[in-house]
Image (spheres, rainbow, N blue to C red):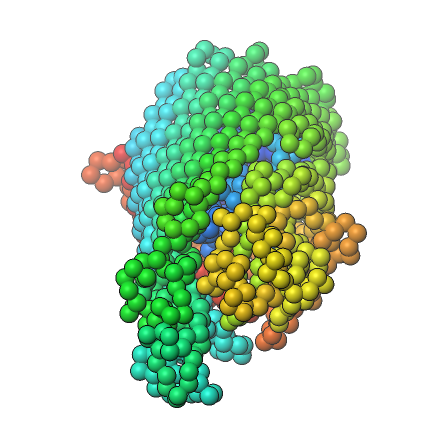
Amino acid sequence: MTGILAVGLAGPAFAQASEDQSTSGDQKTDRQPAKADTSDIIVTGTRIRGLAAPTGSNLVTVSDEQIKATGATDATQLLNQTISQLPTFNTLAVGSGGEVNTVPRLGLRGFGNSAGNASGGTATLVLFNGHRVVFTGYGSSDVDPNSIPSDIIGSVQVMPDGGSSAYGSDAVGGVINFVTKKRFDGLEVHLQTNQADHYHANVATITAGKTWDTGSALVSVNFSNNNALLNKHRSWTSVDYTRFGGADYRQAFCPYGSFTVNGTAYAAPDFSALSERPKCEPNANSSLVPKQRRVNVFSYIEQEITPSLKFTVDGFYSRRESSFYTDLNALGTQVTIDATNPYFHPVDGETSQTVAFSYANALGLNRESPQELTSWQVSPGLSYDVDGNWKVSTNFIYGYSRADIHSRNVVSTALITPTNVNPYDTAQMSSALIGSVANFENNYYGVNTLKSAQVSADGSLFTLPGGDVKLAVGGELLRQKLETETRRGPIGTSSTTYLDSSRKVEALYGELYIPIFGADNAQPGLRSLDIAIAGRYDHYSDFGSTFNPRFGVNYRPVNDLLLRANYQTTFTAASLADSGLNANILQVIPVAPGVIKMYVAGTGLNLKPMKGKTYSLGFDWTPKAVSGLAVSATYWHTKLTNIISQALAAYGGSAFASATPYALCGVGYAQYSASANGACTQSQVQMIQDTLGAGNFQPGAGINSVADIFSSGTVISTLIDARRGNFGVEKISGLDFQVSYNRFVSFGTVFAEIGGSYILEKKIAPTPTAPFVDYLDGKVVNPQTSPFGFRASAGATAGPATVRVSMTYSGGYDIPPGTVGQTKIGSFTVFNLSGTLDLGSIAGNESNQLEFGVDNVFDVSPPWNSAQGTSGYPAAGTLGRLVRVGLRTKF
C-alpha cells in the first residue's frame, strides 16, 4: 500500500503495482487510507471491471493530491506540468486566434501536432468519465480539456499505448481520461489568485453536494479570468537575435514611415537623415497569452432505482470568451508614392519614394481578434446488476459546441491607393479611410454535435485455478456533425459560405480476460499470469470498415515484480475538419519586403484513416525490501501509415516542401526552392483562385487579391498545395520511466519521485516509397520539440503543512544549421515550489486550507531558437515567475 500511496502523493502513478505489498507495523498511522473496493470500477483502456490497469499496458494516473499540488487552474496546465509524453510538456500551451487549433491540442507522443505529423484531427482520444466529448472548433477537431472545473477532477488516467480496441478512432497516440469526483457532502469555496509581471489570473470555484443512502448529487461552478500578456513584457520574445550572435529580424514596418534616398535613410515625423532605417519589433504588442474569461459548470447525479438498477447522469456547460492581439507592425507594408500624393515629402530632390510603414498610428498598437466558444454535453446512463456477477449498462451522449471566431489579424487596403495614403503617419489620413483599413475580418463559425448510444455487458464466465475468466461485450452507435459558416470581408458582412459534413459510426467490441495463474495456483517463479484479448469492429459511413485487435499479457515471477507486454492495432479516421469540408483558401504569407509565399490550404478528398501498429514491454517493481519504493519502465514502439497531414509538415517545413511536386510554381527565394513549373503567372494563380471562389482569398502583406500581387510587382517565391492528404509512414519509439519513494517518519511523511519520457527514434517517410528522414538527429529537419523530458519532485508533510519542490526539464536537441549557424537548442529547466497549510475550523466552518506556490522560481527564459518567429519553444514558453495564493474553505 505504501508504494501505491507514494505515487499518489508524489506524482503521476504507474498503475500496475503489486497488491501484495504490506506496510510494516511501525509505519501504520491514521494517515494511511483504507484499501478501496475497486471491484466495480472500470479503468481507462479496458472494458473489464475490477482491473487495476489494462492487461499488459502502462496506465499513468495523476491523483487528486497531485492535481492540488500543481496549483493548475485548468486541465491543460495540469497535464503540461505532469505528463511528459505530451509534446507541450514544460511549456505554456494556449489556443490560436485563428480557425485551427482553437483549443490546446493534447497529442500524446506528438501524434497529430508535431513536426512531420500535423492534421486537423486529434490522434489522442480525450474522455470525461470514460465518455467521448463533443469536439470544439471550426478548422480542427479537438476536445476542449478545459471545459470542466479543475476542482472537480478527481484523477487523470493516461494510457499512452493506444486504445482503438476499446474506443475506436482517435486513440493512435493513446487515451486521456478525466475522472471527476462523484460524491461530495457540503459546500466548498475555492479562491485563487495568480500574479506575474504584467499578468494576473483569478479563479473562483464553488462546489456543493449531498450524499444519501441510495445516491448522491453534486454541482461545481468555476469562474476564471486573466488579462492578456503581450510579448513586449517578456524579453525573450524579441526577434533581435544579435544578443545571441544571430541576426536582427526586426522590420522597417514601424508606426512612422521610413525610406532611403541615395543610400541615406530618413524617417518621419522629422525626416532627418539617419545612419540606418528604424527597426521595430513585429510582435511586441501581440499576445503571448490571450485575455480570457471562462465559466464552467459540471454536475453529477446517481440514484439507485432498485437495489439492482442504478441511474447516473453527468453533464457540463462551458463558455469561454477570448481576445487575441496582433501587433500592427506585423501587418506593415510598403508603398511607392510621388508628387501625385498630397502627403509626398521629398528630402533630396527625389521624385518618388518607397516608404515602409504600419498602420499603428491610425489603428493603435494592435488589433483584437475576439473568440467565443460555448459547449455543453449530457450523458445519462443505466446499469443493471443481473445476478451479482453480470452487469448490463447503457449510456447515451448528446453534446453541442459552438465556435464563433473573429480573426482580425489583417488590415484592408481595398481603398488605399498610392495617391491617398499617408505612409509617413497614417493617423493623419481621413477618418473614413482609417475606418476602411480596420473594417476587415475573417469570421469562422463552427457548430459540432455528438450523439452516441452504447450498450455493454460484462461479468465472469467461469472460474479457473488462477481466477475468474471475465468477458465484456458491447455495441455503439455514433453520429458526428460539423456545420460551418465562413465570412471574409468587411466586419458584419452578409457574404457567407455554408458547408457541413457528417458521419455515422456503428461499432461492436469485446474483451476477454483470462487469469491462468493466480493466488490459488501460484508456483515459484510463476506467481501470476494473465492474458487479455480485445477487439473492436467499426463501420464508418464515409470510408468503410476497420477491425482493431489488442493482445496483452501480465506475468509476475515474484510478488513484487510485474512484467507486461501488449500488441495492438489502432486507427484515426480523418476528422470532419480534415475531409468533410471542401473549403479551401489561397493564403498570402510575407517572406521579405516585396516577397511572399502562398499556400492552397484546407481539406483533402477521399482521405483514408491513419493506421498504427503499437507494442510495448515494461515492468513495475515494488520491492518489499524497500518499503515505499516503486519503479516502472516501459519501452514502446509505434508505426503509422497513411499519416493525415499536409505537405508543409510531411516534408519538414515549407522550405523542404518547395522542392517537391507540391510546389505548383514559384521562382524561389532564400531557403525556398524554385518550382520545376517555373514562375507563377497571373493567369495560373487566378485560375486557382477562381476554382476556390472569390471569397476564399486570405490576404496578407497588404495584398487583397491576385491582381494586387502582380500590379505591385510582388515576387511569389513558392506556391504550395498545402491541403490535407495521406502522407507516408512514421516510425517512433521511446522509453517511459517512473521512480517514486514514500516513507512515514516521526514528524509525518517524506516523498520523492522522478518520471519522464525519452524518444529513441522518430523517422518519417513523406511517401510510402520515399526514404525515411530522421527527425531527431537535427541534420535535415528541425525536431521542434525536445525528445527527452522529465519531472522530479520532493517534499514532506508535517502536521498540517505540506511542502513540495518540483523540477520540470526539457532536454536540448540538435537542429540543422540555419542562416546564423545555430546547431543546438538548449535545455529548459523550471523549478516550482508549492505547499498547503490546514488551518482547521474557523468561525464554525468545517475546514480551511491555505495554498501557496511559486512557479518558475528562478524566472528562467526558454532557450533561443533561431528557427522560430520568437525565441523559445514553439508552444509559447513561460509566464515567467508566477506567485499564486489560494484558500479552500468547506462548510
Furthest-left residue in this view: 843
Nearer to us in this view, 171 or 656: 656
Q: How many marks?
A: 0
Q: Left or right: 611 with respect to 206?
A: right
Q: Is residue 33 visible?
A: no
Q: Is residue 493 visible?
A: yes
Nearer to us in this view, 796 or 259: 259
Using the image, determine if residue 373 lies above or below residue 272: above
> Which quarter shows the N terminus?
top right
Nearer to us in this view, 850 or 96: 96
Please provide percent x and percent y for residue 292: 36, 49
**Residue drawn where x is 46% and y is 30% of the image:** 399
**Residue drawn where x is 53% and y is 44% of the image:** 140
**Residue drawn where x is 72% and y is 45% of the image:** 641
Q: Left or right: 562 with respect to 125?
A: right
Please provide percent x and percent y for residue 174: 61, 41
**Residue drawn where x is 51% and y is 26% of the image:** 451
Please provide percent x and percent y for residue 786: 59, 59
Nearer to us in this view, 771 or 83: 771
Please provide percent x and percent y for residue 227: 33, 54
> Which quarter shows the C terminus?
top left
Furthest-right residue in this view: 769
**Which of the 4 quarters of the picture holds residue 718?**
bottom right
Q: Left or right: 415 with respect to 875?
A: left
